[in-house]
Image (cartoon, rainbow, N blue to C red):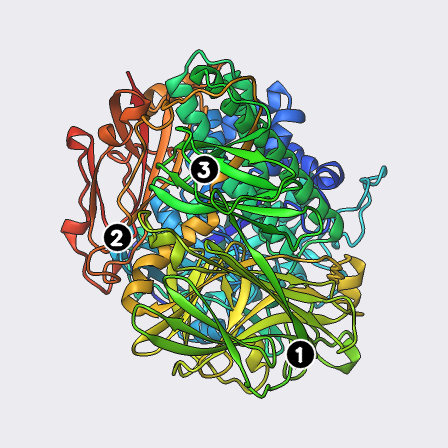
Amino acid sequence: MSLLLLLVLVSLGGAVTSADPLQVFVIPHSHMDVGWVYTVQESMHAYAANVYTTVVEELIKAKHRRFIVVEQEFFRLWWDTVAGELQKQQVHQLLQEGRLEFIIGGQVMHDEAVTAVDDQILQLTEGHGFLYETFGVRPQFSWHVDPFGASATSPTIFAMSGFNAHLISRIDYDSKAAMQDSKKLQFVWRGSRSLSETQEIFTHIMDQFSYCTPSDLPFTNRSGFYWNGVALFPDPPKDGIYPNMSLPVTSDTIHQYAETMVKNIKTRAAWFRSNDVLWPWGCDKQFFNSSIQFNNMDLLLEYINSKAEFGVTLRYSTLGEYFQSIYNRNMTWEVRGSQDFLPYSSDVFQAWTGFFASRNVLKGVARRASSLLYAGESAFTQYLMKHPSGAVCKMWALEQLQALRWAVSEVQHHDGITGTESPKVSDMYLAHLHQGMTGVRKLMDAINMDQLRYEKTEHPEGLILITVYNPLAWNITTYVSVALNSSVTAVYDERGQIVPAQIHNSSDPGHAFDLYVLVVLPGFGYRRYSIKTENAEPNQETITVGRRVMFNRQSAGSGKKIKSRSLSNDCYNVWIDLSTNMLVGITDRERNVTVHTTQEFLEYYANGDTGAGPISDNYMFFATGSAAPAAKSVGLEIVAGKLVTEIRQYFYRDADQQSYIYAILTRLYNVPDGYDKTLTCRPIEQQYRVGPLELNREAIIRIQSNLQTNKRIYTDDNAYQMQAREFKIYDSNTVARNYYPMVRTAYIEDEKTRLVLLAERSHGVSSQDNGQVEIMLHRRLWNNMEWDLNYNLTLNDTSVVRPAIWLMVGSKEVTGSLYQRLGMCLEHKPLVMFSQHTGPEKANNHMVNDDPITLPPNIHLQILSIPGWKYSSNHTEHMRNVHKAKKESDADFSRVLLRIQHLYEADEDPILSKPATINIKLLLKGLGTVRLLEERSLTGTWDLTTMERWKWKSMQKKDSERMSKKSLEDFTVTVAPKEIRTFFVYFQ
């Protein structure tokens, strides 16, 4: 969204008294959704390009005018495809004069509930890199006015990016009312409890009027302050007359306009401590005709400022000018800790918790695309550093990565990954993601084939050669699965040794067999395996064969518990009641403790008639009653093997129905002795199959245990930090208002035992009863609300979804030490690539001897990338180039972006919570000799040694030692709990 924020600025220094006139900062802005109802292409054609064209033209005409630009996608498209040289020169001029200001600066205004922190950082880095490279500009303020709830992660990453203030709007309606009444809408937010004051940020919550100018005028039926009207799709009107254009400011209307505006200003002012009033002017899709906008508002501001009786002084302002005025007052602010503002309700029956699960397919593709991108980034970086003259064209490679960076960044929009967009926009996101993924897969294949050329390895015909790449900076022992249509007699490693593997008949009708291969992978490294395929029966001496046993279908009701069957690996016994074919317990073998556990699918029935009561839609969830069981009978198959045990449960709506609507595939993995079992034994892998749903159904899986939890559940903020969620009772809508986003992790626990859930895409999660967790997996909705129908936002999603969940049961100590790493292992699974064969096999140790990139278990290598930015990391030199309009023609392939993250909180684990010290030169020695290491801000645009953020006075003391800068002596860095540290690395 591009924001034209006409900020009514009250600019007073010193103390505030009631006699001071209100200084009003009128902030012109245009809220421009990258998606939502219309595709990016449709929006560019109908209005978005005109916003920038006309804003630049109007700002140049008058020096007192201002405008703020928020998201970068539309601006970048305008800059690259529409703007002429004169307009580009004018943009540079306006930025230098401070009359045009970039706010947030990311590719989009990201959602805060269902996005992962890595992807939030990615989209910020994409936008910030463009702005700094093009203009030398580094945004310092956020404008998160539209995401549906506010996470505690966002203030932390904005602080790490060098921001001086953070602005949000959508928080719970009753919380906002209370904060307004007590004048507590502004505070210093310490979003991370481990980082605390080192990454705190001043935060402003918009009042109840939010980011849109109040449009009600008492003297006319037409909307006020929107003189250019409403954007028209698909084409702008040829006569320039748009719908709903506001009454012009004339001698007849100016006093009434002024009275309306001043009344609103004074209402807002009463909710804040300072006499500085932020007055946003604009809304969705505004300023496509900036001339008529500014010409009317110019008259109004001049009129109000000329009348002392109004008691206000108005000026156009940027957001930075408003916050600068607040900062200059040197006031002391309350401190807010690491609690977030989720979930968000806009009214009693309007809990915005449905979107946590809307468009499950899009949520899954977005996360898989992100995982593939990070794998491609690290693989290309290593390839280029090791083989600078390799056969893979580096510009072509960079273009493939850039396309996927764009697509993954784009879908983080708050009407993107949320699933709150129209079907055609969802299709747009998916198309961009699939196109980007196809390109990066081609890149990975090209790198793989060229490395085979370096190895000079030959393989006989009749073998399938697979290359497995580990995208994590840890040594990993795990199973990879390969879908095949022919049987397998053996799997060999690079030395020709037989590798533990299991084959069994697949439950997927798309192929005949599933092959599971035990792989031992170095950090950021490759291993190659040869699969011998024959039509003959597999030899049990060279490969394990899983045998399928089928059981009679049983009623899903309470069984007689005549007989239970136990299925085991080294970590668990999983108990199935054969009278119901349902899970009844999980035994943690390490402690010999059994948690009585059941799982069942249920459905909430949604109301689709607004005349009959509250509804569920893309955004909101409203439970009309208790969730009803979705299945009356359950089928069961068990595939038993020495390495993999697979439990297949099929759930049928009716006892005699032939096709199932729900399924659970549960896998237990056994690792032979002599291998590292740490990360493979612990997760119980489950894949669900849900859909297509009947209309107006919201599908959940409910896990009931005997843990004594008092309905408390822990869920993650953006896969970055955990939040404790106490069950709250409301006068109405209690079920929906106790739903929370689960981006990667949720768990329940009692004094001794924890039940952990890990996800590879976002879901809604809740604990509605003691010892219980329910996950919303899928939604299919239709309602007759006119607004939803007009924009095609009814979520009639007929898809079949297949999300995966890993379960872990154990002591709090064991699960606490593993859940972060296991979550990363689920998110970033090894990548399997197929290769061609050329001749007789030769033993080859080339891949084995490479120096792996390995970090301690509490440190995650978040990105290893060649961003390709053309700017100098020396700011003075870069600004000299910008002012000379010096253009670098070639991407910079010598600069490597490295970002590492401490996964644990300061008090979470006695060992893993300790700071970790890493020598970057040793870490990356396999890529060459590191000659220079520069620490940067989170998105790379600031040299950390020169970045000085505003220091806001607060009511809590700061630890000056914690706030001090860190040195990089001998290429050694120490990473403290929850730190994310970013570096530019240069090699000899």
Q: Is residue 577 above or below residue 135?
A: below
Residue at image mark 2: 977
Residue 966, quarter of picture: top left
Where in the figure is residue 53, as x and y percent of width and height?
66, 32
Q: Which element type, helix, strand or loop, lies under badge 2? A: loop
* Front disc: 1 or 3: 1
**Badge 2: residue crowd in 10 Å (few <14, some 14–19, many ≥20):** many
Q: Which element type, helix, strand or loop, lies under badge 1? A: strand
| Res. 554 mark | 1
Amino acid at pointer 1? Gln
Where in the figure is residue 165, as x and y percent of width and height?
38, 51
Residue at image mark 3: 125
The answer to which of marks 1 and 3 sits earlier in the sequence is 3
Q: Nearer the viewer, residue 633 or 859?
A: 633
| Res. 917 mark | none
**Badge 3: residue crowd in 10 Å (few <14, some 14–19, many ≥20):** many
Residue at 62% across / 25% down in the picture? 80
Q: Which element type, helix, strand or loop, lies under badge 3? A: helix
Amino acid at pointer 2? Pro
Q: Nearer the viewer, residue 7 or 189?
A: 189
Q: CA distance from mark 1 to mark 3?
A: 53 Å
Q: Is residue 157 above or below residue 657?
A: above
The answer to which of marks 3 and 2 sits earlier in the sequence is 3
Where in the figure is residue 418, as x and y percent of width and height?
60, 56
